[in-house]
Image: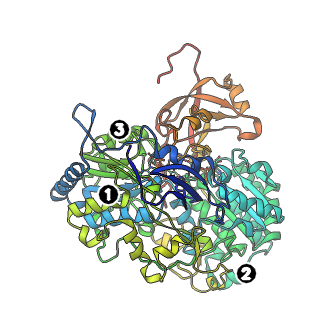
Amino acid sequence: MNVKTVVPSGIVPTLCRMCETHSAINVHIKNDVLTDITPFEGHPINRGRICPRGGAALDLFYHMDRILTPLKRLDNGSFKEIPYDQALDEISEKMTSFKKQFGARSVGVWKGEGLGFHQQEDYVRRFIHGFGSPNYFSNDSACYNGRYLGNHLVCGFWNAFPEFDQAKLIVLLGTNPPICHPPFMRELADARSKGAKLVMIDPRLNPVACYADIFAQPYPGTDGALAWGLIRYLVKTHNYDSDLVDRYAIGFDKIAAYAEKFTPEYVQRQSGIFGYVVEEIAQLIIKNRPDISIYPGAGLEHHENGVNSIRALTILSCLSGALGRPSGMFRPEPLGIRDLKPSDDLPLDGLGPIGADKFPVLYDIRRECHTMTAMDYMLGKGEYPLRGMILAAANPAVSNPNTRKVEKALAGLDLLVVNDFFMTRTARLAHYILPAATFLEREELHFYPTQQRVNITRKLARVEGIRNEYRFWYDLAHRLGFGENLFPWKEDTEVNRWLLEPTGLTVDKLRQYPQGYVYKPVENQKHLRGRLPTPSGKLEFASPYLQRLGLDEIPEYRPPSYRSKADDNYPFVMTTGARKSLIYHSRHQNIARFRDVHPEAEVEIHPADAAGLGIKDCDNVRVVSDVGELVIRAAVKQAAELRQGVVEIYHGWEDWRVNFLTHDEINDPISGFPLLKAVPVRIEKIEVGSNLGH
Ligand SMILES: Nc1nc2c(c(=O)[nH]1)N[C@H]1C(S)=C(S)[C@@H](COP(=O)(O)OP(=O)(O)OC[C@H]3O[C@@H](n4cnc5c(=O)[nH]c(N)nc54)[C@H](O)[C@@H]3O)O[C@H]1N2
Ligand SMILES: Nc1nc2c(c(=O)[nH]1)N[C@H]1C(S)=C(S)[C@@H](COP(=O)(O)OP(=O)(O)OC[C@H]3O[C@@H](n4cnc5c(=O)[nH]c(N)nc54)[C@H](O)[C@@H]3O)O[C@H]1N2
Ligand SMILES: [Mo]
């Protein structure tokens, strides 16, 4: 591996992108070698701390299995190294021929979590738009959009990163901050030291639950009932922001009437959370409002009723008066950089974006196609053929639901291009694999929205033979004839100059602010009590927009189907994807010291359930859903660690893919999200000596 650093030896502050938190780090550089990563002290987001995954960025950078040359799959299934330009020539030729034969929409792109959600995503969107196809896909068919839409539909925006340390009450539902968002922990600790109360709602005990004032374990998929129970309590006792409701909300009467039935007893029957606990949470809200953070995590959106649960929680936040407060529903003001996303002068909506007919809200609000429907198109069951896909930083053969179908669909494409560091399960199916550059090889702008703070990351090194993400899209766009128009900048610093131009800030200036540059001080936002960015300009407790689409006008609660239509064949309910500290979706299983900590997949099971099945800790069991099955080791937990009847399996294992068991066709009607966290399953004990069926 031939590495050339592009900054002088020394210690260079930049941002980590081993997760979306973007902690500030120092990269130590000596004579063309990146020698170490340590925390950068002065940034308020991580305050001089980094997690072990941040420290492991160099393990990835220098990993011996890292792909360093483009690979082409041969007819016999093996891969051959080819020059980069040859790979791009062949890919662009194929794309051009599909375009001629079937139209541009026969090609799509798919951005994975590895690229994040901002500038890198915008390149991908810009590229496919320039090609003329509406088919932009991403991991957001199963991440983030459920929460985005749940909030957006009520108030027109979503504050994904509340300032917990300014709250007097924090209610966390279906999230696991110490594992998933380590910097949230110092905010929680600060809030706690100032006396803030903490409520944690999760069927599974997590580290934060251990020190919460209230920890309640609902049946998966029933948080909506709890939200409505809390709404009812606030309304019944007249403890809500009535000025806000009277002047700035539509639909209050409808939600007040609907909430009636959610008595504490009813909520208890639906969710399993004791009625008196519901009342205690409601009283905490009343006592501490409006300084309240109500934060739903991914645990709420991976359900067939996820968006409505999140809408109901957003309404609850509004009623508590949290609108416009940094701890609650803050609407970050943008810096005003230029927009890389394709402009509306070339609308492609008429070309049948995949999934827009089934999930119109997802496309309308997010301009995003639906990955699960894409599989049907690849398999020839769509309205038109989808023949080519470019995947950047995504591993859907592990991460998308219904793995068997995903593999069949991807394997049947005429062109599958995968841009990644490693030979992943998905890359194995590709016709071309392009070697990816790490975040240490690119420069991009990053925003911390609630702090109204911007950073620029540093490009530190080049690895011979590897082009970074921007350059990949640039080179391909130029071959396809729209480069001059849409990708005129030769490298990412030029892009950043163009982006920043209208703001008066410069790349050089931002480089002098490794702690980030606050472009506007944060204050409580009274102006949000004026016009909101919803269709009516008001808080939409009831949504005329959704009603017009034939969807729920108010966020009605529908029990998850494993509870409303219980099937004796599948007596357990499986949640998936509770994150592991050292693994990131399918990433880092190839870092030996991390693998030592998480050596093998396991199904977590309640001790009473295990005893009922005669299963002991570490026994192999077969987990069966009506989609597929998986043989896996049992981890028998302590009674408080899991609600009885619930089992949990992590989703990122390359060798134990839980998505063989998950449904791609049971979706939330608004977001289109798959059912990943309430899957009916049965557990079969495997007798010693029997065939494991691997
Ligand atoms: N180490 C690590 N960190 C990560 C990631 C990673 O893979 N590894 N992934 C990143 C990404 S992309 C994301 S989206 C975030 C997700 O991060 P979070 O939003 O914090 O979500 P999860 O860790 O998935 O936590 C989900 C929790 O929800 C619970 N849960 C499941 N079903 C329900 C339910 O119906 N109701 C309630 N109340 N709880 C439920 C689970 O038991 C679990 O504890 O993490 C990010 N951070
Ligand atoms: N059953 C179940 N399934 C789930 C979930 C769940 O909770 N349960 N969670 C869902 C969620 S929230 C998410 S976000 C998705 C994530 O799903 P994916 O986006 O598919 O995430 P990964 O599996 O981590 O795949 C990312 C790939 O990008 C590569 N990569 C990392 N950085 C870069 C980069 O800078 N450039 C390039 N080109 N490649 C890079 C990595 O090597 C890795 O192979 O999974 C979803 N799937
Ligand atoms: Mo995610």
For label 2, the SS is: helix
The answer to whether residue 593 of the structure is visible from this angle is: yes
Residue 96 is labelled as none
195 or 498: nearer the viewer: 498
In the rendered structure, the answer to whether residue 433 lies left or right of residue 11 reads left
Q: Separation of disc 3 and disc 1 at Cα? A: 20 Å
In the rendered structure, the answer to whether residue 93 lies left or right of residue 276 reads left
Please tell me whether residue 253 is drawn above or below residue 195 in the rendered image.
below
- Mark 2: amino acid: Ser
Q: Residue 345, how many percent across, how many down? A: 30, 77
Q: Give the quadrant of residue 287.
A: bottom right
Q: Separation of disc 1 and disc 2 at Cα? A: 53 Å
Disc 3 or disc 1, which is closer to the eye? 1
Report whether the residue tagged 3 is closer than 8 Å to ligand 2: no
Q: Residue 89, how many percent across, how many down? A: 20, 53
Q: State the residue position of label 3.
A: 428
Q: State the residue position of label 1.
A: 472
Q: Give the quadrant of residue 577.
A: top right
The answer to whether residue 341 of the structure is visible from this angle is: no
- Mark 1: amino acid: Phe
Disc 2 or disc 3, which is closer to the eye? 3
Q: State the residue position of label 2.
A: 242
659 or 276: nearer the viewer: 659
User: Few, some or many C-alpha atoms within 10 Å of disc 1 (few <14, some 14-19, many ≥20)?
Assistant: some
Q: Residue 284, how many percent across, how many down? A: 81, 65
Q: Earlier in the sequence, mark 1 or mark 2?
A: 2
Q: Separation of disc 2 and disc 3 at Cα? A: 58 Å
User: Few, some or many C-alpha atoms within 10 Å of disc 3 (few <14, some 14-19, many ≥20)?
Assistant: some
Residue appearing at x 65%, y 81% in the figure: 525
Residue appearing at x 21%, y 62% in the figure: 480
In contact (CB < 8 Å): disc 2 and disc 3: no
- Mark 3: amino acid: Arg
